[in-house]
Structures are given as structure tokens and as C-alpha cells.
Amino acid sequence: MAVGEVMRMEIPAGGDLTVTTPELHVLAVDDSIVDRKVIERLLRISSCKVTTVESGTRALQYLGLDGGKGASNLKDLKVNLIVTDYSMPGLTGYDLLKKIKESSAFREVPVVIMSSENILPRIEECLKEGAEEFLLKPVKLADVKRIKQLILKNEAEECKTLSHSNKRKLQEDCDTSSSSSSSHDDSSVKDTPSSKRMKSESENLSSLF
């Protein structure tokens, strides 16, 4: 869900109110076809839209971060979460994380690193670089659901902050407009030299009668 989107509320023919949960688009990156299938299945069970690629290089191509050689049309590309394996030939998950965080278009997208190796310095390195979480394989359904709820909560808070910011700006614009209008009205009712002269002449005529 991109910033500014909200959950849709629908009222079916029966009259019961239902809430349609926004669908998250997840890019899953893993060189193991078995692990790709596992994470894809868990994400789909959690009602996520999933795109899978087999390497960090292919992920960069999909996101258009490969120096203009990407195959994707990126104008309308929306990715809410990137889940990547750490140990991959060529571009590692850590390298991919750094590329994403250096990108102006995708630096705000949460990145989750997966690994079958519980190596503390590696975990700390990824978290320091900006990873949302570091999951140990095999990834469980509870892990995916927890991350999804975290992403939805963060985006809801961003939408709320954006809404408050827009309201505050609108109020400031209204106040400025009102102040300008008031100033204009005050200047329009001030006595001009011509009006003062006409008023004086009227008073003189009144004194004659």
C-alpha cells in the first residue's frame, strides 16, 4: 500500500459492513527454487501479491536499479516489501539491501533478510544498514504474518501523519487568505481625500439650513 492509500470499506447487499484489507506487493529474492516456493506460498497464504526472482541482479533489474537496463516499466511499480536471502552468488542479500537503501525511489521500502546461518555480526551488519528484520530459515507463517502487520501499521501511521500535515497546510492557507481579505476590506473603507471633501461640504450645507 503506497502512502496515501487507505483500507476500503464496502457494504454488501445484506447490509453487513466489511473491510477490504489492502494487498501488499512483495518482491521475494532467493537463488534456491525450493526456498522461493516456500516464501511465495507463505506470502500468498497471508494474502500478499508476490513477485519472485532468482538473484540480487534480477531484483535490481526488476526495480530498475541496474543502470537503466531493467526490463520493467517502473512508472507505476509499487513494492511494499522486499524479502531477500542473504547468501546468493554474485550480488548478496546484503549488497542488494545497500543498493535499495541508496535508491531515492525505494529507500523507504522495508527490506527483510533471510538466512539459514545464525551469524550475529552478519545480522547486526544488516540491521545497521537498514534491514527491517533478519529471519532465520526455515521462515514460518507466523513470521510472515507478523511482518505484514508491522508494515500495515507503519504505513497507516504514515498516512495519518500525511493527513494531519495536509490539514494543517490547508488551515494555514485559509488563515492567510482570510487575513489578506480582512486587510483588503479595511483598506476599502478608509476615508479618501475625495470622500472627506464631500463629507465636509455636506456638513456645511446642513449648517446653512
Image (cartoon, helix red, strand yellow):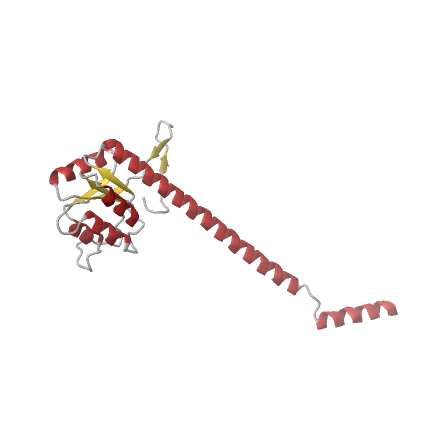
Q: Position of residue 52 (x, y in %)?
A: 17, 43
Q: Residue 42: x, y in percent? A: 21, 34
Q: Nearer the viewer, residue 193 or 32?
A: 32
Identified at 87% across, 68% down, the residue is 207
In the image: residue 175, left or right of residue 91: right
Q: In which quarter of the image is the C terminus?
A: bottom right
Q: Is residue 191 left or right of residue 65?
A: right
Work out whether residue 206 can be spotted: yes
In terms of depth relative to the viewer, which is nearer, 184 or 126? 126
Number of labels in the image equals 0
**Vertical placement of residue 150 versus 172, above or below:** above
* 207 over 94 or under it: above or below: below
Picture coordinates of residue 143, whole percent (x, y): 26, 34
Q: Which quadrant of the figure contains the N terminus?
A: top left
Q: Residue at x 19, y 57 (%)?
A: 66
Look at 24% across and 54% down and name the residue there.
99
